[in-house]
Image (cartoon, rainbow, N blue to C red):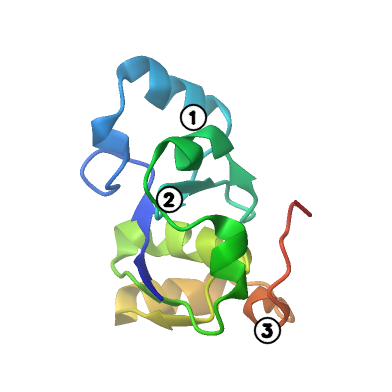
């Protein structure tokens, strides 16, 4: 599967701008930092706001987790933290990115943390 990653901000997320002000405020209060395929993630890679994915036509997260190869394509400094959040979710196995995002990820990542290798769900659901 091939997916894209967005930061939870206007113009950078494919979902953010389509929601009402009330919905954006609600999801922001849950700590949304990133989105991928209408799934929302906090900075630690835990899925939040699960109802959004249930209202959209998308591949369910548990189904994505069972796909052997899930490639995310995203880049840029503005998306770097969001990319890190989605990588921590364990849903993505490979990343195609640019130097700005890669430099950020290599600097900010925790040593020994490789959720894509075991495909674990950080929130256990």
Secondary structure state at the residue bearing disc 3: helix
For residue 50, side relative to residue 58 (left or right)? right
User: Which residue appears at 37% of the width and 47% of the height?
Assistant: 57
In percent of width and height, residue 97 lies at: 33, 79
Determine whether label 1 and label 3 are within 8 Å by CB.
Answer: no
The alpha-carbon separation of the residues under discs 3 and 2 comes to: 21 Å
User: Which residue appears at 35% of the width and 59% of the height?
Assistant: 79
Classify 30 as above or below 110. above
Q: Is residue 49 visible?
A: no
The alpha-carbon separation of the residues under discs 1 and 3 comes to: 29 Å
Secondary structure state at the residue bearing disc 2: strand
Which of marks 2 and 1 precedes in the sequence? 1
Give the residue at the far left of this rendering: 11
User: Which residue appears at 57% of the width and 64% of the height?
Assistant: 63
Q: How would you rate the neighbour count of disc 1 (Cα within 10 Å): few for under 14, some for 14-19, many for 20 or more?
A: many
The alpha-carbon separation of the residues under discs 1 and 2 comes to: 11 Å
Q: Quadrant of residue 56?
A: top left
Residue, disc 2:
35
In percent of width and height, residue 33 lies at: 48, 46
User: Which residue appears at 61% of the width and 69% of the height?
Assistant: 65
In percent of width and height, residue 78 lies at: 32, 57
Residue, disc 1:
27
Residue, disc 3:
117
Give the residue at the far top of this rendering: 22
Q: How would you rate the neighbour count of disc 2 (Cα within 10 Å): few for under 14, some for 14-19, many for 20 or more?
A: many
Q: Quadrant of residue 16?
A: top left
For residue 87, side relative to residue 76 (left or right)? right
Which of marks 3 and 1 precedes in the sequence? 1
Secondary structure state at the residue bearing disc 1: helix
Classify 33 as above or below 52. below
Q: Is residue 64 visible?
A: yes
């Amino acid at each position: 599967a091939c997916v894209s990653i967005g930061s939870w901000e206007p113009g950078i997320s494919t979902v953010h701008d389509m929601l009402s002000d009330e919905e954006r405020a609600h999801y922001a209060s849950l700590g949304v930092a990133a989105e991928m395929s209408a799934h929302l993630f906090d900075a630690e890679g835990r899925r939040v706001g699960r109802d959004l994915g249930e209202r959209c036509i998308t591949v369910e997260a548990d189904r994505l987790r069972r796909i052997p190869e899930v490639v995310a394509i995203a880049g840029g400094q503005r998306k770097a933290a969001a990319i890190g959040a989605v990588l921590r979710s364990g849903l993505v196995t490979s990343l195609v990115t640019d130097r700005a995002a890669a430099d950020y990820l290599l600097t900010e990542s925790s040593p020994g943390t490789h959720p894509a290798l075991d495909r674990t769900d950080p929130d256990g659901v």
